[in-house]
Image: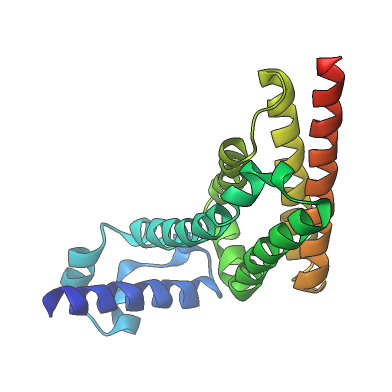
Amino acid sequence: MNNLLSSNTKETIQATLLKLLVDRPIEQITVTQIAAQTFISRVHFYNCFTDKYDVLETIKQQFLLSFKLILAENTDYLKNYKSYSDAKTRELLYLNALKNINYIKKHHIHIQLLIKNDPVFLEEFYTSYYEHFLTAVPQELTAEEHLIVIHYMTRGIFHAVFEVWLADQCQETPEKVAADVIDLLMVSFKNICEKTTNNRR
């Protein structure tokens, strides 16, 4: 029971911080303000978190974990993409990409707040994509060529999703963004196949 109450309190504290971040940067927010709006004492706050930055870090890590779990769902498709037709590969990857994009759209306000208040958030988000592709995409090229392809995939998706779509307040439909992401992935797979064929000649 106590663990449940503690968990609920932590979630409420996180929600309170996110509300406060809408109007001011984290530097201008105090633990006293967070505690007051959460209707708890400062002592209770410190029983849950080290400080306000600990709250922000927890929010970020929970978001990144959920995002990575969605990404991981397409690992088998990526590892075995040659086992499917191009149409089937596109279909399977599209469904996962759409789930990712919808997740980002659902939380886009919170993502924007994290971008503004956590200087390493975007870098960690980029790393999530990069490490996923590094693990999931089979290495059929030289180590150097493989890394070039992974960087191309990651950079292309990151640009489409974060530097264009998210910056534009998610105006484009998730379906269109997901389709663009899959177009980029399919081009990457085509390049891998072509390079693999050339290397064997």
Above or below: residue 52 compared with residue 174:
above
- Name the foreground residue: 148 vs 26: 148
Residue 197's x, y, as percent? Answer: 84, 24
Q: Give the vertical position of 25 relative to 20 (above or below).
A: above
Between 152 and 17, the residue placed more toward the observer is 152
Q: Residue at x 48, y 62 (%)?
A: 66
Q: Toward the viewer: 144 or 189?
A: 189
On the question of residue 122 being in view, the answer is no
Q: In the rendered view of the protein, which quadrant contains the C terminus?
A: top right
Q: Is residue 151 visible to the viewer in this orientation of the structure?
A: yes
Instruction: Please tell me which residue is depicted at 45% across the width and 57% down the height of the picture.
Output: 65
Q: Residue furthest left?
A: 2
Q: How many marks?
A: 0
Relative horizontal placement of residue 63, taking residue 113 as reference (left or right): left
Q: How is the image coloured?
A: rainbow
What residue lies at 31% left-to-right and 68% top-to-bottom? 31
Residue 164 is situated, as x and y percent measured from the top left of the image, at 80, 58
Residue 174, image quadrant: bottom right
